[in-house]
Image (cartoon, rainbow, N blue to C red):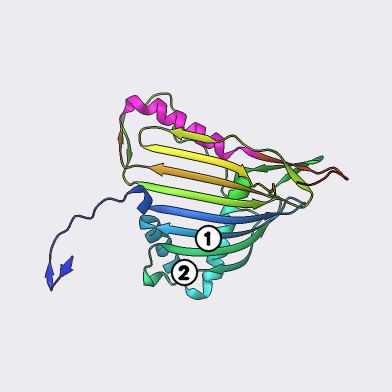
């Protein structure tokens, strides 16, 4: 770096998990037909902020809307963008914050009086597989950078529906990674709050710990496939 007109070498300290990654906050309003309207705020930090800014810099400002549409379509196949805020990436803010408002259809599957809501339908993304499919491993598993990714979604239930079942809390760990998922109902029973925190610390895991890493990944993937079950309130049945 250059300081006082002189160049010198400096060691850049590694990220701590809280300094690198993203925090996603969503306010989701479900409709009785299984669709939803979502207000999403993405706060990117550290390397994640650099990566997101680089993606936006590659797009002319006149095409920011197309870029925002591409983001929501990647997360939700049926999404329709309603509004967006994308700051100038050249200013290099950290954290880098973008905001998206969109609707999406067919998020919930209706079966009789029930509505099934897969986690991925509410939080975005598609079903993935564990990268650790073999029974054994010869080489260490290396995580070059620490990071922490958070998601919190406050979900407003459709009119006339109540919660039938929510997933149990998940707390999965191995030596360098941790995943926490909770789903809680509000006191007035009108909303659910889904929270996920995934933390990775930089380091190496020897082959002897491979089975623990594999079990961790399988547990977190199962958690992301959990479902919330809502039930239509019977006619004449009192509300909360």
Say whether residue 50 is magenta.
Answer: no
The residue indicated by pointer 1 is: 41
Q: Which residues are magenta?
A: 206-227
Q: Nearer the viewer, residue 118 or 56?
A: 118
Q: Secondary structure at mark 1?
A: strand
Is residue 225 visible to the viewer in this orientation of the structure?
Answer: yes
Q: Which residue does the image show at 42% across and 63% down from the upper left?
A: 96
Question: Residue 172: x, y in percent?
Answer: 47, 33
Which residue is located at x 45 percent, y 43 percent? 198
| Whether residue 133 can be seen here | no
Q: Which quadrant would residue 169 be assigned to in this image?
A: top right
Q: Is residue 30 above or below residue 203?
A: below
Up the image or down, 207 lies above or below 179; here it is above
> How far is mark 2 from mark 1, CA to CA?
20 Å
Q: Position of residue 193 (x, y in %)?
A: 60, 48
Label 2: few (<14), some (14–19) or many (≥20) C-alpha neighbours in 10 Å: few
Give the mark toward the camera: 2 or 1: 1
On screen, residue 31 versus residue 204, left or right, reads right
Q: Quadrant of residue 105?
A: bottom right
**Helix, strand or loop for disc 2:** loop
Of 7 and 239, nearer the camera is 239
Q: Is residue 222 left or right of residue 186?
A: left
The residue depicted at 79 percent of the width and 47 percent of the height is: 239
Label 2 sits on residue: 59
Closer to us: 206 or 16? 16
């Amino acid at each position: 770096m250059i300081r006082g007109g002189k160049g010198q070498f400096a060691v850049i300290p590694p990220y701590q998990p809280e300094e690198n990654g993203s925090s996603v906050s969503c306010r989701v309003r479900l409709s009785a037909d299984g669709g939803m309207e979502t207000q999403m705020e993405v706060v990117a930090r550290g390397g994640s902020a650099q990566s997101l800014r680089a993606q936006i810099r590659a797009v002319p400002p006149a095409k920011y809307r197309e870029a925002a549409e591409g983001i929501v379509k990647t997360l939700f196949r049926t999404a329709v963008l309603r509004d967006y805020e994308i700051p100038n990436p050249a200013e290099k803010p950290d954290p880098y914050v973008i905001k998206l408002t969109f609707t999406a259809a067919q998020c919930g599957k209706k079966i009789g009086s029930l509505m099934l809501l897969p986690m991925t339908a509410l939080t975005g993304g598609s079903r993935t597989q564990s990268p650790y499919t073999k029974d054994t491993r010869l080489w260490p598993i290396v995580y070059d950078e620490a990071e922490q990714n958070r998601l919190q979604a406050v979900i407003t239930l459709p009119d006339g529906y109540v919660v039938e079942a929510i997933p149990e809390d998940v707390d999965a760990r191995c030596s360098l990674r941790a995943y926490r998922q909770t789903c809680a109902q509000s006191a007035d029973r009108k909303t659910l709050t889904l929270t996920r925190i995934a933390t990775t610390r930089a380091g190496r895991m020897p082959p002897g710990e491979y089975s623990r890493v594999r079990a961790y990944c399988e547990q977190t993937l199962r958690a992301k496939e959990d479902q919330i079950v809502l039930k239509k309130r019977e006619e004449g049945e009192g509300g909360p």
